[in-house]
Amino acid sequence: MCKKAFRIDQYLQTLSNTVFSVELLPPLRGAGIEAIYNLVDELIPYKPLFLSITYHQEEIIYEEYENNIRKRRLRKRPGTVAIAAALRFKYNIEVVPHLICGGFSREETEDALIDLNFLGIHNVLALRGDPPQHQKYFTPKKGGHRYAYELVEQIAQMNKGIFLDVDTEYPTPTNFCIGVAGYPEKHHEAPNIQTDITYLKLKVDKGAHFIITQMFFDNKYFYNFLKLTNEAGIKIPIIPGIKCITNLDQLHTIPMNFHVTIPHELVKEILKLSKPEHIKDLGIEWTVNQIKDLMANGIKCFHFFSAGKVDWITKVVNKVF
Ligand code: FAD
C-alpha cells in the first residue's frame, strides 16, 4: 500500500526539523532501472523528503555517410514519468518529476500530466528546459510553450478542471503542487536579476507553489535572492539547490553548464591539492559549512543535485543533519 501523497508546499509550511531532497538523472538510454535503484538504496536510510527526476529533451544528430548525411533523433535519457512511478511504488517515497516545455506540444504536456495524476503523483517541477545541443536558442515545439510560466498556467488550469480537450465530459480537477526554478545569480539569458525576478513572480502569479533554486557556492547570492524575492512579493517556499565540487574538472564544467560562480577562496584551496580524494574532502567541507550557515539563518530544506553520484550527499547529511 502506497503512503498517501503530500503536497510539498504544505509540508514545508509546517516544517519544524531539517530535511533534504535529491535530484536524480534518469540513467543513460539502454541502462536498466537497477542503476537508479542502487543510488536510491544508498539514500533511503537517510530519509530524503522527496526525489526529483530530471527530463532531457531529445537531441538531433547528423551522421555522415559516403554519399549523404543522415539526420537522427537521439533520446539520451528516457523515462522520467516511468522512473518517478517506479520509485514512488518501490520505495513509498514522494517523487517530483520534472516537466519541460521543450519538445512538448500542449496536448503532449496534458497527456503526461494525466498519466501522473492517474499514478497519484501530484508534485511536479515545471521548467522551460535547456535548448538541446543542436539549438543555439530555445525553440518551442509547434503548439508548445516558450516560457515556464505558460506551462505553470496550463497545469493551474487543469487544477481548476479546465483541460485542452473541451469535449471531455466532467473532467475531474487535478491537484498538482507546482514547483519552478529560481536563479540566485540570475538566469544566464536574463539581462539582470531584477528582470529575472519579475518573470519568477509571473510564474508565481500563474500558480507556482514552491521554488527550487539553481546551485550557488556563496551564500551571499542566496540571501540577496531571498531579499529580492521578498521585495517582489514572492511568499511561497524557496528551497536552496546545493551541489558539491568533487573533482578538478568541475571548476570549469560547472560555470560552463550552469552559469554560476565558484568563489575565489574555494578555487584557490582546490588548486593547492593534487590528490582527487583531497579535492572531494575539501568540496564536502565547503558544502557542510554552506549548509550550517544557511541553517543558522533559518533554512530547513535543502535540495541536492546528485548528477548520478550520491556518496557526497550521504557524507554531507551525516555531518549536518
Ligand atoms: P523560464 O522561467 O521560462 O525562464 C527562461 C528565461 O526567460 C529567463 O532568462 C527568464 O528571465 C526569461 N523569461 C521568463 N519569462 C519571460 C517572459 N514572459 N518574457 C521574456 N522573458 C522571460 N533543464 C532541463 O532541460 N531538464 C531538467 O530536468 C531541468 N531541471 C532543472 C532543475 C532546477 C532546480 C533548475 C534550477 C534548472 C533545471 N533545468 C532543467 C534547467 C532549466 O530548464 C534552464 O535553466 C532553462 O534555461 C530555464 O528554465 P526555466 O524554467 O527557469 O525558464
Image (cartoon, rainbow, N blue to C red):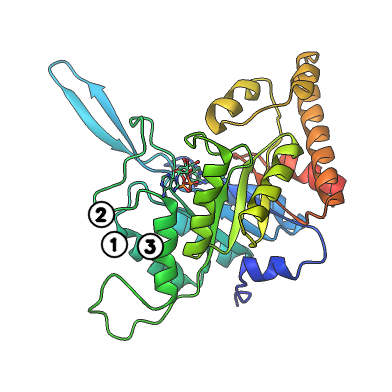
Q: Nearer the viewer, mark 2 or mark 3?
A: 2
Using the image, tell me which numbered label, if any, was put on residue 112.
Answer: 3
Give yes or no for contact between labels 2 and 1 (Cβ–Cβ under 8 Å): yes
Give yes or no for contact between labels 3 and 1 (Cβ–Cβ under 8 Å): no
Q: Nearer the viewer, mark 2 or mark 1?
A: 2
- Is residue 223 left or right of 96 when viewed as pictured? right
- Is residue 109 left or right of 294 when viewed as pictured? left
Whether residue 33 appears in this view of the structure is no
Q: Which residue is mark 2?
A: 143
Place of residue 138 in the rendered image (x, y in percent of width and height, measured from the top left): 36, 38
Q: Mark 2 belongs to which amino acid?
A: Gly
Instruction: Check disc 2: other Cα within 10 Å, few if <14, some if 14-19, many if 20+.
Output: few
Q: Mark 3 belongs to which amino acid?
A: Ala
Residue 279 sits in which quadrant? top right
Where is 119 relative to 283, above or below?
Answer: below
First in residue order: circle 2 vs circle 1? 1
Q: Residue at x 84, y 44 (%)?
A: 293
Give the position of the N terminus as an image quadrant: bottom right
Q: Which residue is mark 1?
A: 107
Instruction: Check disc 1: other Cα within 10 Å, few if <14, some if 14-19, many if 20+.
Output: some
Q: Which one is in front, 106 or 194?
A: 194
First in residue order: circle 3 vs circle 1? 1
Place of residue 26 in the rendered image (x, y in percent of width and height, measured from the top left): 50, 46
Where is 12 relative to 232, above or below?
Answer: below
